[in-house]
Image (spheres, rainbow, N blue to C red):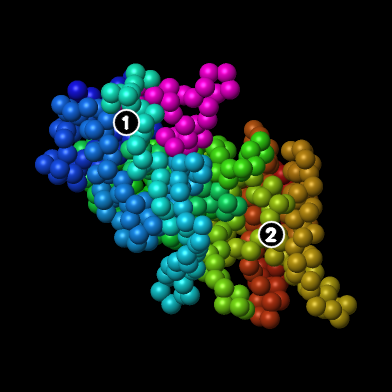
Amino acid sequence: MTLTLSIFDPNTLLPHRAGIAGLALALSVINPDDVPFAWEVTEDAVKLSWECSDKEAVLSLLQQTYRIQDGYLDVPALNLDPQGKYTFTEGVMTTFLQHGKQRKQLKESITLTFLIDEGQPEISQTFRPVEDCYYTGDFKEAFSSKGAFKSKIPLKGHHLPGLVECFAHGAYQESPQGFLSLVFLPLACSYYHLPGYRSAVVIPEVKNLQQWVRRRQNSVGRTYKNFRSSSSGESALRFLLQENLIQDNRQFRVNYCEVYQLGKQQWDGSQSYLKQAVYRVKVSDEILALYDSAFQFFKPQVRQNEKGETWLAISKILPWLCDNLIADKPWYSDFHTFYKQNELYERKGLVKMTQYLDTLEQTFFDAMQGAFSCYLREQHIQAQKQGRPLDYKQVTDKVINRLQRPSTQQDFAKTTVDFLSRHRSKATRGVGAEIYQWLHKDNQWKQARDLALLAIASYTGKGKDGQPEIPAEVLEDDSQVDTEFELLVS
C-alpha cells in the first residue's frame, strides 16, 4: 500500500496542508526500525508505504506520535517542557477533543503553579489529568473488518474544531489521505486560552514541508503567559509575530493563518467549546511591528487579592486594537464605541500608542489636546474662585459627552470648531487646512471623532497633587485671532 499526501493537491484545504506538515514532523523523530512502514518527505509531499495491513501501519504510526504520560497528552516530536505539555494538552482538550466522548480525564483536579515574571507571585491553575483520548484509541471507524482503509471515513470535531454532523446527510466524509492528514493536524497548530471560557486554535499556512519542520523543531513550547490571549484576533497576530521572529529563509515564512474561536453556543448547553467564528488573517510586517509595540504596552499583569489568590489580568484594550490592525484600519478606529462600552483603566498604554500617529493625525490630536488643556485651566480657575477642588473626571466627561453626541458630519464639524475656537491654544495656529481636511474630507469625520475622543480620554497633562497643568501658551495674550484657522474650519 502506498499513500501520497501532497500540500499542493487541489482537494486539500489549509487544515489538510497543516496536517501533512504535522505528519512530516511526527515522522522526523521516528526510528525506521521500530515501525512496519517506510516514508519519504519532500518539499511538498509525504509518501508512506507498507506491506502489512493499513490498520497495523497507521496504528503503529499513531502510537509513535501520541501517548499519555503523567496526565498529559504527550507528543515526542514537539519536545515540550512541563509547561509546554500543559498548554498543548489543555489547548487540544478545549478544541479538537472538547467533546467528552473523545477524552477521558480524572474527576479530581490537581493544582499547577506557573511563574509568569521574575519577582512576581506564581499563578495557580487547576488541571484534570488525561487518562485516555481519541488519538490513543483504535480508530475503528477508519478501517474495515479486514484492516483496510474505508473509501470514505466519517469525521467530526476531533479532526477539525466545530465540524458537526449534518442533520440531512450525516457526518462529513473524507478520503484516507484527507483523514490521515487531519489526524496529525494538532501537531501543527498553536493554542490559546481566551477570556470568558473560550479558546482559539491557530492553523498555519505551510508552503514547504522540510522548511516548516526545521522551523517547528527550533520553536519552543508555549508558556502559560503566551497561552493566555485577549482575543482570537490577538492570537493570530501573536502567532504570526512569533513565526516572524524565527530567523531563516523568509521565502517560506508563515504569513497567513486561520483562527478557530470556540466557546458556548445558545443552541447547545452541554458543550463548552463549540465553534463560534473562523478568522483568516494575513498582515504586513509593519502591522506585526505595531502589534509587538502594543503588546508591550498592554501586557497581561499578575494580580493578587488580600487572600493571596493570584490571577493573570488580561488587557481589554488589546482585543479592540488587534481587530483594527487585522482589518487594516487605524489602530484607534471606533474608539467612540469602545469608550462607551468600557472603563478606561489602561490610560498609560494609550498614551504610549499615540507615538504611532502619522503627521496629520498628530496635528489634529495635538490641537484637541491643546484646546482641552485650555479648557481645564478655565475650569480650574473657576473652581478656585468658588473655593472647591476641580472634579477632573466630571469636566473630562463633559467634553467627551459633547464630542460623542453628534451623529452627522455637519454636527461634529460644528461642535469641534466651536470647542477649538472657544479654547484656543498654540496647537491650532497655522494648521487650519489640516483640521479642515479631517472634518470635511470624504467620510473621514468618524475617524476624526475617534481621534478627538482619544485625545481627551488619554490626556495626562496634570501637575502636582493631581491638579491640571497650566500650559505656558494659555498664559500668553490670546486676543489675536488666527484668521486662517477661522476661515478654513468655519
What residue appears at the point 75 percent right and 44 percent down from the top-left corner? 412
Q: Which residue is mark 2?
A: 343
Q: Is residue 1 magenta?
A: no
Question: Residue 450 has which mark?
Answer: none
Residue 282 appears in the picture as rendered: no
Element carrying mark 1:
helix
Q: What SS does tag 2 mark?
A: loop
**What secondary structure do most residues of the magenta stretch adopt?**
loop
Q: Which mark is residue 180?
A: 1
Q: Is residue 93 above or below residue 311?
A: above
Q: Is residue 165 magenta?
A: yes
Tell whether 346 sits left or right of 485. left
Compared across the picture, whether 132 is left or right of 466 comes to left
Q: Quadrant of residue 25?
A: top left
Q: Position of residue 202 (x, y in %)?
A: 43, 42
Q: Could you say which is closer to the camera, residue 28 or residue 192?
A: 28
User: Can you name the residue that lies furthest to the front here?
Assistant: 145
Image x and y of residue 381, in percent: 80, 74
Let me know if residue 168 appears in the view.
yes
Residue drawn 32% across and 24% down? 145
Residue 250, by quadrant, is top left
Residue pushed farthest right?
386
Q: Check the image and report above or below for 441 versus 172.
A: below
Q: Residue at x 46, y 41 (%)?
A: 102
Q: Is residue 9 above or below residue 138?
A: above
Mark 2: amino acid: Glu
- Which range is magenta? 153-179
Q: Position of residue 298 (x, y in %)?
A: 52, 60
Q: Earlier in the sequence, mark 1 or mark 2?
A: 1
Q: Alpha-carbon neighbours of circle 2 within 10 Å: few (<14), some, or many (≥20)?
A: few
From the viewer's side, name the closer residue of 284 and 113. 113
Q: Is residue 325 left or right of residue 454?
A: left
